[in-house]
Every structure is written in structure tokens, then in C-alpha cells.
Image: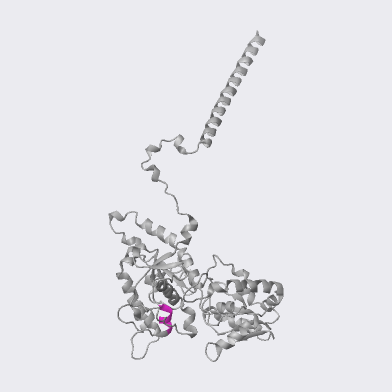
Amino acid sequence: MADRNGGSYYSIALLSWKSLIVLLSLALTLFVLSLSLLLNSGTRSQFIDQNLFPHSKHCNPPLTDHKQQQEQPLKVFMYDLPSEFHFELLGWEPDGYTPWPDLRLKVPEYPGGLNLQHSVAYWLTLDLLASDINGQTGGQTAIRVHNSSEADLIFVPFFSSLCFNRFSRINPQQKTNKNKVLQKKLVEYLKRQPEWNRSGGIDHVIVAHHPNSLLDARMQLWPAMFILSDFGRYPPTIANIDKDVIAPYKHIIKSCVNDSSGFDSRPNLLFFQGAIYRKDGGFVRQEIFYLLQKEKDVRFSFGSVQKQGIPSATKGMQSSKFCLNIAGDTPSSNRLFDAIVSHCLPVIISDDIELPFEDVLDYSEFCIFVKTSDALKDKFLINFMRSISKAEWTRKWERLKEVEHLFEYQYPSKKGDAVEMIWQSVAKKVPVIKRRLHASRRFSRFGKLESKFSFPLPRNLVS
């Protein structure tokens, strides 16, 4: 009897397990079939009624072809600033009808010497003016539009670097200088413009290439995109690589045309000419000078644009394999670009330097980088330079000659020159600027959101 009962319990238990397995198998089969149908469906319209979404045909408008979008020129609205802010600083006199010179008759010349190295605003302004002349549109990267609502960006044609170079000193009879006066006038002018008030300045472009240019106005105009030589004298909240653009210096030394030299025909290993004793981070120069002064194949000397400084530097760079670019008062200098056009491989000893167009240029292909801490070690720099083989030098030298045109300023601008490269760098900032502008308009129907564009001074700058 017990055996029969045990067998009965066993049979029931076995049947229950079989039923459970069958149920689980059926559930798994249904899940797999459902998943298969979902994955094989072409669009969600097989499962969801698209009529539930109003205007569904317009929910996903076709995107502009990326290549076609890149080929469209940057549309720039340029303020008709009074000529005292730009070409009058060159000695040009307006005729009373327009603040701009007629470039078909004569192009006002920019002052030479060290003034020329920070002439970026001049070349960009000429390029925009050229787009107004029939048949001249510069490098086709940027064109001037006369309706600000059609523009991607607003350009402020203030020659701030020249203004600093020429008019920052105070005469005994003056309480202030012209440089300060024009900066104050500029701020007042911009704050009156609907374009500035509409965006708070974030879609404006201002050139302040000299490290000391726009010194008084930069704290009020900092929402704008600055075009700078480096960030050495700017707090990161005022200027940074995400918001602003680094532009090359205009080289002072003439380009080395039809260069037939080579590794063996350049007798000097290393060359440096300039101010040796500098303030701020410039102490590195004098330390390196002491380390290299007894090396026979190194030319390390004091020099400036006065007293035949430029001819001496030209001869020295064009007869040297490597040219030192050492941080001075600021991380950068025009010495780097003088070396490039002299076909002298730059040796960059400046840990905080920002380089123009580095998103598309690999400087390690035609420059040598040395950390400051290593350069200050006894015998490190000279031994390192002597260890670079002729083959490596030649490879970098050939690459340098391939890219030197990217640092050339000229009028009219040409394909792939410095003017076009700067406009391309500026254009890359436009999508972020537009996103910020569009986001600011979310609640515009409820009135002006002044706090959105008031841009209060960062806390670390509030006194």
C-alpha cells in the first residue's frame, strides 16, 4: 500500500514538473517570436499610429549635407565703425562719405617693424572689404553681409594692437592716452548697438592680438570671441581655447624663397636672437643662455629690430638647422613664425604655449618640443639636439616647407593662407554660438531675459 502511495506521489510530482517545463517553453517561444517581429519591423509605424503625432511628416526635416555646409562661406556683418578705430590709426584720412578706404584706388599700408607682427585685425578687415568689390571675395571663406540678421557673426574692426603700440603712452599735458579713450568709446558704441544687445556679444568677433591690447575693455567685452596670440595675460574665465581663436603672428623676417639649402649647408646647430633678460617666465631664456654660451655651433645673442637686428636675424636663421623659441614675457612670440619662413626647424620651449590651427596641424611633424624642466638640465638640450639625425631633420624640414603658406598674411588673401585659416577657425565656433543663442530664446515670449546675456563678471575677478 505504501509503495502504491509513494508511486502515486512521484507520478503527480513528475507530471507537475513536465507541465511547468511546457509552460516555460511556451512562454519563451512567444517572447522570441515577439522580439523577432520587433527587430524585423522597418519603422515604428507598424506598431504605433503615426496620426497620434501632429505634423509627423515634418518632425525630422532633412539635414543639410555636411560637405555642402562646409563649402558655404562664413557670413560676417562688420560694423561701420568710425575710421578713428581703424584706418585713421594708419594715417589714412576719410573723405567724409565713408569710414572705409577705396581699395580699388589704394590700400593703406600698415606700419612696419614690430607693429606688423600683431596686424591681424588689418588683414581680416581688408578681406571683408574685398568681398564688397566685384570679383574679389578673398579666400572665399568669409564674405561681408550688410544685414546683421543674415550674418553668422558680427566683426568689430578695431585695430587694437596698433592702438596700443602707438597711443598707449601719456604725454605730460594729457590726463589719459588715446588708447584708453578709444577703448572706452568702443564699449559705449557696442552697448548701443542692437546686435550686441540681442546676443550679449557672444556672436561678436574682436581682435586683440597684442597681449596688452584692449587691456581696459576686455573685462567688459569678454563674452565676445577674441582673436589672440596666446592666453598668457588672460584669466581662463575671460579667454580660453573653447571660446576664442589663436592666430599666428605676422612674420617680420622675409620668406626664404627658392631655398636650396639643406642639413649640411646650414653650419649653425642652434640659433637664438632676442631679449635674453625678461620678466615673468622669461628667466628661462637667461638660464639657457648660460648653458649654451660656450658651445661653438650655437649662436645665442641679444638683438632687436633696431641696429640691423632684422638682417642679422634673417642671416642667422637661414644658416641654422634649429631655431630656439623660448617663452618670454608671454608664452608665444613672432620668433616661431620667423623661423618657419626661414626654414629653420623651431625648437619650442614654452610649456603653456597655444598654437594656431592645431586642430588641423600636427606641429610635431615640423617642430621640436622640449619641456622647460628638461631644457634647464645641464647638457640635456645640446645633447638632445645633436642626437637628431640628418634623416629626421630633413623629414621635418620638408614638412615645414609644405605648411609655411598657412602662416602667410596677404591681400588679397589666397587659398590656404593665414587669413583663410583664421576664418575657418572662427567658423568652427559658430555652431556652439548658435546653440547658445537658440537656447536663450526658449522663454522669449515672456519678455526679455536680461540675466541670460548680462554676463556678470566671474567671481574670481570681482574685487
Q: Is residue 259 left or right of residue 332?
A: right
Q: Residue furthest front?
A: 135
- Can the viewer see residue 367 in this picture? no
* Residue 103 image offset from top left, x and y in percent: 40, 78
Toward the viewer: 153 or 272?
153
Determine the main secondary structure of the stretch shown in magenta: helix
Residue at horizontal 42%, vertical 48%?
61
Quadrant of residue 215 within the rendered picture: bottom left
Task: Tell me residue 374's x, y (percent).
Answer: 64, 74
- Left or right: 264 as drawn, with respect to 324: right
Please state the horizontal and vertical placement of residue 381, each as a whole percent of the image.
66, 77
In this rendering, would 172 be left or right of 328? left
Q: Quadrant of the C terminus?
A: bottom left
Q: How is the image coloured?
A: one colour
Which of these two is toward me, 177 or 207?
A: 207
| The N terminus lies in quadrant | top right
* 149 lies above or below 214: above
Which residue sits at x=58%, y=85%? 313
Q: Is residue 173 above or below residue 16?
A: below
Q: Which residues are magenta?
A: 159-165
Task: Residue 226 in the image: state x and y as whole percent.
Answer: 43, 70
Quarter of image, res 436: bottom left
Residue 372 visible to an observer of this rendering? yes
